[in-house]
Image (tube, rainbow, N blue to C red):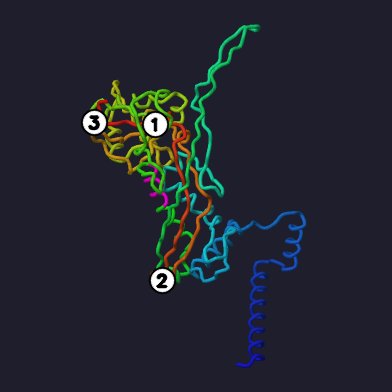
Amino acid sequence: METKELLSELTTEIKTFKEKTQADLDEKGIDQRELADRLLQLEQSGVTAPANTYNSKAMTIQDDLNTFIRTAGEQKGMSIGGGDSSGGAAVVPFRESGIDNLLRDKSPLRDLIAVRDVGEFGSFEEVVSQGGSTGAWVTETGARPETNAALLEKVVTELFELYAMPVATQRLIDDNYVRLDQWLADQIAVTFAEMESEAFINGTGVNQPLGLTQQTLAATDDGTRPFGTLEYVPSGSATNIDSDALISLFYALKSGYRSNAAWLMNSNTARYVMQMKDSNGSYIWSHGDITNDRPPTLLGRPVAIFEELPDIAADSLSVWVGDFNAGIRFIQRPGINLLPDPYTNKPNVNFYAYGRVGMNIRDSSAIKALKTATS
């Protein structure tokens, strides 16, 4: 078909469409010029049509990321959120739009502890007070001798690198009905949440944070232990725990910590503890209301389930309580780096994503452990 014939056919189709549209307007009793005048009046009065509920900038970022993923990094100059142009991307907007929220949903850790962003440095340094400052009452004209100053300690929280490498099949990448940014965010969030929780509880301190169960512990009161040493409370039995032991553990915390405290245990321990009663025959566990986002409570404080904690057994540290936000510094380097690898695992594509986080004890009086032991 020649160009002239194509233009003629297209003109006919446009004319037919206009006539049909005008017929629809006439049927509804709508005058086209009157409608245009009304729209003009609304614009002049400052009233605009409702905006799309999607944020245009976020959609652009998502579309760019989908393009980036589907091209598997072939566009070497592509950069998202200020990332470099060497084939990867620092996906800060992608992280803000999905991974942070997913991490909070999939791990109770980020509900317990506020995460602090750090910059280019590989660690976060702070000076914390152990207390110990004193004062004195005096008369208006009495002498004022020197008093004791607070004891200060320097705490350094190191950043450690963690990574995930989800694999996408070529069919998944070619499927335009799948939002690859959402799929990838979910894969990364699940892996990172599990790794953070494991390090929080059992981390070895080698290329990862030192976990709670690996910390130095002693059965001595606050103010008598070295800074950084956590206190454990014996359960009174070599093989079991009871409600009296949990009450003793809770009240080993100072009142300022108890008001913001949370309990940690695994599901097996929770199943056992929720059947306990106090001396009056009342259950010490309340089931809460999951549908209304109310967690279960023990002695009035919320319970967080960490499956990484051990079951109740001899010498186990199966139950923890404390103000974890006060007791632990949790830092992260903002941004997730994303590097696609379409060559190693053909025809699949590996997506190498990595970030940096760190955790460290900053107040060893804020956290207590229950040890299944007599002393």
Q: Write the residue at 35% across / 39% down.
A: 214
Q: Quadrant of the C terminus?
A: top left
**Magenta span contains residue 197:** yes
In the picture of the structure, the residue carrying the numbered disc 3 is: 240
What's the CA distance linking mark 1 and mark 2?
53 Å
- In front: 290, or 234? 234
Residue 171's tag is: 2
Amino acid on which disc 3 is placed: Asn
What's the CA distance linking mark 1 and mark 3?
24 Å
The mark that comes first in sequence, 1 or 3, is: 1
For the record, the magenta segment spans: 192-200
- In front: 175, or 361? 361
Amino acid on which disc 2 is placed: Arg
Mark 1 vs 2: CB contact within 8 A: no
Residue 49: image location, x then y, percent: 67, 58
- In front: 258, or 4? 258
What's the CA distance linking mark 3 and mark 2?
53 Å
Residue 282: image location, x then y, percent: 31, 25
Amino acid on which disc 1 is placed: Thr
* Left or right of 36 in this view: 333: left
